[in-house]
Image (cartoon, rainbow, N blue to C red):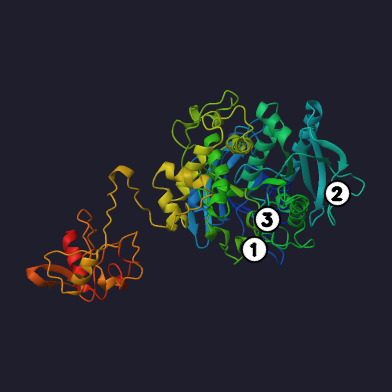
Amino acid sequence: MDKAANATNGPVPQHNSFRFTEDNVSMTSDFDSGNLAKAERAGPGIYHLWTGPDCMGTLAENGCRSWLFFKVTAPIGLTATFTVKNLNLQGKLFKEGMKPVIKVPGGEWERVCSPVTFNVVGEDFEFTFMHFFKTTEAEIAFSYPWSYNDHLQLLEKLRLSALCQGIYFYKENIINSLEGRRCDLLTITSFSGMTEEREERIPLLFPEQSVERAQKFVGKPIVIITARVHPGETPGSFVMNGFLYFIMSDDPRAISLRDNFVFKIVPMLNPDGVYRGYYRTDTRGINLNRFYTNPSLAEHPTVFAVRELVMSYHRENKDQIYLYADLHGHATKKGCFIYGNYLDFPRQIETCLFAKLMALNCVNFDFEGSNFTEKNMHAKDKRGLSKDGSGRVALFKSANLVRCYTLECNYNSGRLINQILPSGLDKNPESSNDSEMYKNGPPAYTMPIFEDVGKAIGISLLDTAYLNNNSRVLPSDPGLKQLRVDVAAFLSTQIPFRFDPNIKKASKSQEDLENFIKNGCKPPKLDSRPKLKKIPEETKPQKRYFRISESSTASSERPNKSKKSSVVESPKKEAADVKPKQLSVVPVKNYTFPKPPKTDNQKILQLPRGRSKLRAIGQHKTSKSLSTKRGDSGYERNKSFEKEPMLLTVMEAAGE
């Protein structure tokens, strides 16, 4: 990109100054986080602006060009028109009402008042806005800025505040960036559980050898939160600030958090990119959030440091890390939401439980907009780099962290507001859906809204551990049993769980789902034996016995000409030396046999003396009591009766 003739170049290509004597107007981006690569006067009070791409002027220059931040000095009363000519395609944001932000001396950052028009020209996105100068100075940015210097000033304020409040606050430089800037690690907790020992020095980290490591604490799980791996995603910094403000406050929930957790915070992972006014990459043009799987100390020092920190705690105690979250901004998907990981169903309920609690504690958090799919874990960006290398996925796989998240906040707005229960402790309007700002639906996001999301992280974290004495949820659901059922019911409608037959069956009723969760999300064990109906003693047929007489022996050898004949085995037969054919039988009149199932290929079998009976071809039908086992078609024949088919048939006829 060619420099304008009126430009004064700063040490960073994005840091420049411009002067237009015709209008007595000057512009500069020569400061921390500034970005204005080029400015031209197109007419009286009309200016065309270009932002500098990441790594501008180097071999690593790339197409990431959305961050804009500059200062203007102009006469009072001037109406200036600005057209930004070369942003990435941000049409989705601006169609939803996105506007740049402006700040005047003595004021706060707010969206520009004028309408914003936008257009796509070739591969570039343009937008135009106006500003009427009531003061001589104004700062203008793509979104609410948070510079490296702002970050350092906040850490100093928090350190002084901790001294006054008796909070354990310790700041360490975990690693230097490629350009030598600090990457600070904060340890925040209460003094309870503190030992005299210091944490061990991790090889290759903590370059300030004269500075001792933080104190060791016992009996407290660790929460790790990071932000600004992508330098232009400033919403992540405001969420981080809201979280820090909350856990450092005198709110009873914050006190409980400090008493029960140790917080390890890395507020700015890419200080070089932030300082230079980059949008997405570091000084080598690298998206650092794709290298957590195997980062290099020489090429990705801050990511290397975070991974080593996480793994050192994991090696010390596999259950020590309670939660990891990386905070981001998002330009396309609306709302505040979470990207989580895909796990088996019982653990999926647990990982989604935190996101569900966020929706119950934050007006602007979108639970159903969150994504926990396996597909999203492996999705590739435009450069072909997979999300397998993101902090969320790589650290989940390496340390088996159930609560491992990326939290995203759209730059502009959301798609819903949650109806949350009021809390006597939350006085700020962003925390109540009854406040004026929510009367017309989802509002345009502001810094306080982002900070409220950070506050909700702390409150929801306390709820997951059942430690929130001022909870919106725990009074009515002390063990979060019902909330787990609600989460399981939601997951049962999502891919791939909706295709699981056991989950599908369990989700038909709340009781079944409760039992399914109670059983470890395993199907109930089924008894493979057939269930027999127990017959009450008084309804059982009385056993009938018969005697074997010598007079009947001879007659049994003659053909049977009786009208009815039956065969019944006697349980107390004692004539072992008498052949079965020499026996005569006395039928048991009150015994009936169950009907065998009908088959499709039935024929009428003609029986002696005019009797007929339906019988399947090639099959002798017997009762259950006479059969040995069930075959493919009806009951298997009892072989002891195969020589007497006539007797079988007569017995069946008698049973009808």
Q: Which residue is labeled 3 in the image? A: 395
Q: Residue at x 29, y 67 (%)?
A: 635
Q: Which label sits in the foreground, 2 or 1?
A: 2
SS state under label 2: loop
- Helix, strand, or loop for circle 1? loop
Q: Residue furthest left?
A: 610
Q: Amino acid at mark 1?
A: Asn
- Residue furthest right as drawn: 210
**Observer-nearest of 343 and 128:** 343
Q: Earlier in the sequence, mark 2 or mark 1?
A: 1
Name the mark on residue 62: 1
Which of pointers 2 and 3 lies earlier in the amino acid sequence? 2
Can you tell which mark lies on residue 200?
Answer: 2
Structural distance between the alpha carbons of marks 2 and 3: 21 Å
* Left or right for 196, reference 619: right
Query: Residue 121: image x %, image y %?
Result: 50, 59
- The single residue placed furthest to the front in the displayed view is 550
